[in-house]
Image (cartoon, rainbow, N blue to C red):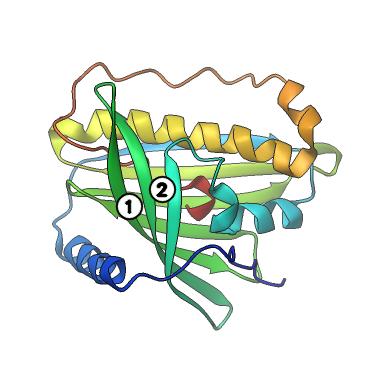
């Protein structure tokens, strides 16, 4: 399978690249903490290879992800059938009714010969999200997309981060479906209820976990 092509509008940034390296280094040294897990599923009326290619290309998530405003690519390599994409997502995350500019640093690992990829993201304050997205044949030639999310954050923020992150990823799945199925897909009802809101206030920006297609 040919690896998806990165969107042409994504450009490098030396300052953000340095921040990315620091965030990755801190995450590797961070002690294990309490985690929250969420599993999301979506059915798409398109073949798995086509759905995988659209999801795996991070540029396709601009306009689909609720908070995403800009993507900055730092590195994109393929080695031994594994494509690694390192990037920073610039997001506006709502906190207590105010949109707070947030930088989410991410590493996406795409199995170029398979229908799955993993993404790890790091956001201040000390928020980490790990994602595994798989694409399996569904009924009538469609695709079942399954996203496993693991959130790690300071205890006071964990519930808020998980609720907001899961809600943002649910919205991304809904918004990418018309890209693959056509405008008529928006008329198809989504049987899944909206994720519950976490009533606890946050003391700072909460990560959305990055684009769904990037993990």
User: Percent x, y for residue 200?
Assistant: 20, 19
Q: Which residue is drawn at 30% across and 51% down?
A: 103
The quadrant of the image that shows the N terminus is bottom right
Callout 2 secondary element: loop
User: Percent x, y for residue 159?
Assistant: 26, 29
Asked whether the viewer can see residue 154, the reply is: yes
Q: Which residue is drawn at 59% across and 63% down?
A: 7
Residue 99, quarter of the rendered image: top left
Q: Nearer the viewer, residue 96 or 177?
A: 96
173 on left or right of 199: right
Callout 1 secondary element: strand
Answer above or below: position of 183 versus 17: above
Judging by the rendered image, the residue that carries numbered circle 1 is 104
Judging by the rendered image, the residue that carries numbered circle 2 is 210
Q: Residues within 10 Å of mark 1 (few under 14, many from 20)?
A: many
User: Percent x, y for residue 96?
Assistant: 24, 22
């Amino acid at each position: 399978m040919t690896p998806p092509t990165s969107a042409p509008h994504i450009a490098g940034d030396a300052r953000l690249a340095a921040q990315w390296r620091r965030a990755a280094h801190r995450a590797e040294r961070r002690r294990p903490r309490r985690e929250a897990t969420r599993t999301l599923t979506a059915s798409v009326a398109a073949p798995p290879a086509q759905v995988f290619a659209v999801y795996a290309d991070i540029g396709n998530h601009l306009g689909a992800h609720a908070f995403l405003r800009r993507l900055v690519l730092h590195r994109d390599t393929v080695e031994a059938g594994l494509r690694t994409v390192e990037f920073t997502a610039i997001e506006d995350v709502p906190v207590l009714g105010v949109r707070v500019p947030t930088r989410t640093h991410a590493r996406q690992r795409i199995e170029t010969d398979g229908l799955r990829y993993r993404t790890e993201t790091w956001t201040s304050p000390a928020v980490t999200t790990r994602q595994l997205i798989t694409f399996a044949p569904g009924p009538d030639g469609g695709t079942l997309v399954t996203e496993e999310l693991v959130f790690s954050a300071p205890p006071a923020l964990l519930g808020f981060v998980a609720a907001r992150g899961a809600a943002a990823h649910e919205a991304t799945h809904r918004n990418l479906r018309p890209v693959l199925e056509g405008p008529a897909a928006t008329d198809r009802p989504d049987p899944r209820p909206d994720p519950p809101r976490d009533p606890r206030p946050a003391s700072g920006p909460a990560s959305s976990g990055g684009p769904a297609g990037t993990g």
